[in-house]
Image (cartoon, rainbow, N blue to C red):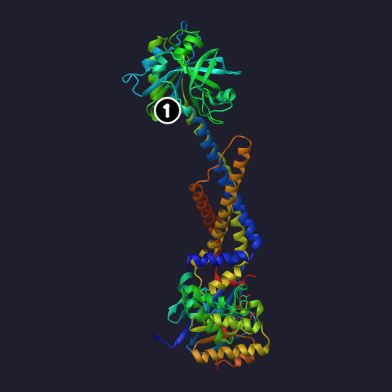
Amino acid sequence: MTPATPWVIQATHLTKTYRMGEVEVHALNGLSLQIASGEVVAIMGPSGSGKSTLMNILGCLDRPSSGEYILDGEAAARLRDDQLASIRNRKIGFVFQSFNLLPRASALANVELPLRYAGLNGKRKAKATAALEAVGLGDRIHHKPTELSGGQQQRVAIARALVNDPAILMADEPTGALDSRTGKEIMDLLLEINRERGTTVILVTHDPNVAARARRTIRLRDGQVEEAAS
Amino acid sequence: MNIFSALKEALGSLAANKLRSSLTILGIVIGVAAVIAMVSLGRGLQASITSQLSGIGTTQLSVFYMPDPEIRNPQPLTTGDMQALVDPINAPDVKAVSASISGVGLVSFGSKSSSATIYGTTANYAELNNLKFQEGGFFGEEQVLGQSSTVVLGPRLADLLFNRTKGLVGEMVRIEGQPYRVVGVLQSLGQGSVSFSDTDMAVLVPYTTARLRLIPQGGRDQVDTLTVQVRDSSRTMQATEQVKQILRTRHRTPVGLDDFYVFASKDILDAANSITSMLTIFLGGIAAISLLVGGIGIMNIMLVSVTERTREIGLRKAVGARRRDILVQFLAESVMLSLLGGGLGILLGWLIGVAVAVVSENSGNAITPIVGIDSILLATLSASAIGIFFGFYPANRAATLQPVEALRSE
Ligand SMILES: Nc1ncnc2c1ncn2[C@@H]1O[C@H](COP(=O)(O)OP(=O)(O)OP(=O)(O)O)[C@@H](O)[C@H]1O
Ligand SMILES: [Mg+2]
C-alpha cells in the first residue's frame, strides 16, 4: 500500500495544554511538522520547550489537546485507547531515556513482549533472538537487565522497539543516560537500522554531535517549531 | 495472550514477592479451610444424629398409655387395639402393629444370675423393631398362642450369664426361677444408638407367657406399648392421625383429651435434621465472613501491586498492551492467589475435619466429618469468584491507566 503523500507523519496545529490548578501550561502551541518515510530527524530545543510532549503525541502515547495528527494514513488523534495500543504495537518502536526494561525478565523476554501483545505465538523466540542479534546482543539473550551495562540495556530496548518491524522508531533522549562513547555507538546503531531497513527515525537529543548526524534537525521553542535546517 | 500463559506469568510475578504473596494466600487458606471444616463437621454431625435416630426407624410410630389427668376412666392399650389398628379402610397407611409389655425379673443360668428387663411381645415385634440376631431367631405365632417358655436373650445379658454370645440356642435359662429355652441371641444395638427399649440387657418372651407367669399385674389382653409400622415414611403424619382416630373411637375419650400418646420418631429425625442444617448454614456463614476478609486482603495487596508497578504497566501499554491484556494480567494474579489459597484451604479444612474425627472418636462420640465434592467445588468456585471480584477493581485501575502518566510515575 502506497500512502497518498510521502509523509509518514503529518501533524497540524498541535496543542497540548496542561492545567495546573489556576495556571494553564501550553506545552505545545500550534505546532505543525511533517516527516517523510525513511528520514532521520533530530528534535532539539531547550529544556521545557515541549520535546517530550511532542514525542509522546507522535508516539501515540498521548493525545493532543487539539490539532490533527495523521500517522501512516491513520488519524491518530481521534482513535480510541485500544486502537492507539494497536498502532503503538504495529507501527511504532519507542526507545526511552531510562530504558524501561522489565527488571525480572531476561533480555529475550523483554524483546518478546511486543510480539506477545501482537498475538504472535509460534515464532516469538526466533524473531526476538534475531532482533537481539541485530543490535549485537546475540550472546546476551538470557541476561537480566541488572546483568547488563547501560549501553547494552539500551540495545535491548532498541531490539524491543524493532522486533515488530515498525515503520517509525522514536527515541526520547536515547543517549541521555549514557556516556558519550556509548551514546555514539547507540547513534551508530540507530543510523544503521535506518539505512538497512528504511525505518524512519525520530530522536530527541541535547547533544549537537548526535543531532549533527541526523539528516534534519527540528528546533523547538515554547511549544513551536523554531526553524528547520537540513 | 491465552489464559494459561497469563496464569503462568502471574505465578512468576507472585513468586517475585514470596512473603507478601504467602501472607495474602494465608488469608484465603484460613477462610476456605474454615468453610470446609465447618460445613463438613455440620454434615458429619447431621449424619451421626441421623444414624443414631435411625435405630428407632423412620417408619415407626410408638403408642403409649398416657392418660390426660382430666379423663375420668382412662383405658389401657389392649391387644384389641392392636388388632383394630390393622384396618385397611380406616387406617390405610398402617402396615403392621406389634405389642409389648415389660417388667423386671431375675434371670439365671447355673450359679450366675442377673436382674434384667423382661419384654413380653408379639411374634412380629422383632421385625417391626429392626432387631437383628447373632444366632437363632425370634419366637413365632405358634409359641405366642401356646404360651411357650421360649426366650430370646440380649447380648450383654447372654455374655453375663454364659461368658459368650454364641452357641446358646437350646440352652435353658431360668427367669424368676422358671425354666425357658433359648431360641435366639440378639445383636447389640450399638453404642450411641437411640431406642425406646434397651434390648441388650433384656429377655424377650411371648407376651402371653409373660402375662401368665412373669408380669401378672394388669388384664389378660392389656399391653404397654404398641409399635405401628407405617407403609411409607412420607405418610407418617397421616398414619398418626388414623391411629389416633381409631383409638379415640375405641376408648370413647372426650373431644380434645386422649388417654394415649403417639410418638413418631420421624418427627424427631426431621427436627434434628433441620436443627443441624441450620447449624451448618450458621457455621458456614461465619466461616464465609473470614473468606470475605481474605478477599479484601487480596484486593489490598493487588492495589499495592498496581501502584508499585505503574511504570511497568505504562511500558506494557507503550509496546502495545490493550486494556484487556492488562486486565487479564492482574486478574490472573488475583485469581492465582485465591486459587492457591483455595487449594491449600481445602486441604487444611479436610485435615481439621480428620483431627476432629479422631478427637471425637476418642471422646466416645464419633462424628465423621463429610467433605463432599460439592463443598470442594463450592470452595474452589467461591475462591476464584473472590479472586475475580476483589481483583477486578485493582486490575481495572491498572488497565485504564494512560500510558504517558503511567510511564512518568516513579
Ligand atoms: N504532566 C504534565 N503536567 C503539567 N505540565 C507538564 C506536564 N508534562 C510536561 N509539562 C510541562 O510542559 C512543558 C514541556 O515539557 P516537556 O517535558 O515536553 O519538555 P522537554 O522539552 O522534553 O524538556 P526536557 O528537555 O527537560 O526533557 C514544560 O513546561 C513542562 O513543565
Ligand atoms: Mg524531555
Q: Residue at x 44, y 88 (%)?
A: A6
- Is residue B323 at least partly visible in the picture? no
* Relative to B91, A69 lies left or right: right
* Relative to B169, B25 lies left or right: right
| Numbered-mark total | 1
Residue B257 percent coordinates (x, y): 45, 12
| Residue in front for this viewpoint, B21 or B96 | B96
> Tag 1: residue type?
Thr
> Is residue A184 shown above or below B245?
below
Residue B346 percent coordinates (x, y): 56, 51
> Is residue B49 shown above or below A128?
above
Q: Is mark 1 within 8 Å of ligand 1?
A: no
| Residue in front for this viewpoint, B301 or B116 | B116
Q: Residue furthest left?
A: B89
| Residue in front for this viewpoint, B225 or B243 | B225
Q: Residue furthest top?
A: B72
Query: Which residue is disc 1 drawn over?
Result: B59
Q: Secondary structure at mark 1?
A: loop
Residue A38 percent coordinates (x, y): 49, 89
> Is residue A6 shown above or below B334?
below
> Within the displayed image, which quadrant is ligand 1 positioned in?
bottom right
- Is residue B331 at least partly visible in the picture? yes
Q: Quadrant of the C terminus of chain B?
A: bottom right
Residue B60 percent coordinates (x, y): 44, 25
Query: In the rendered structure, the residue with mark 1 lies on which chain?
Result: B
Q: Residue at x 39, y 12 (%)?
A: B80
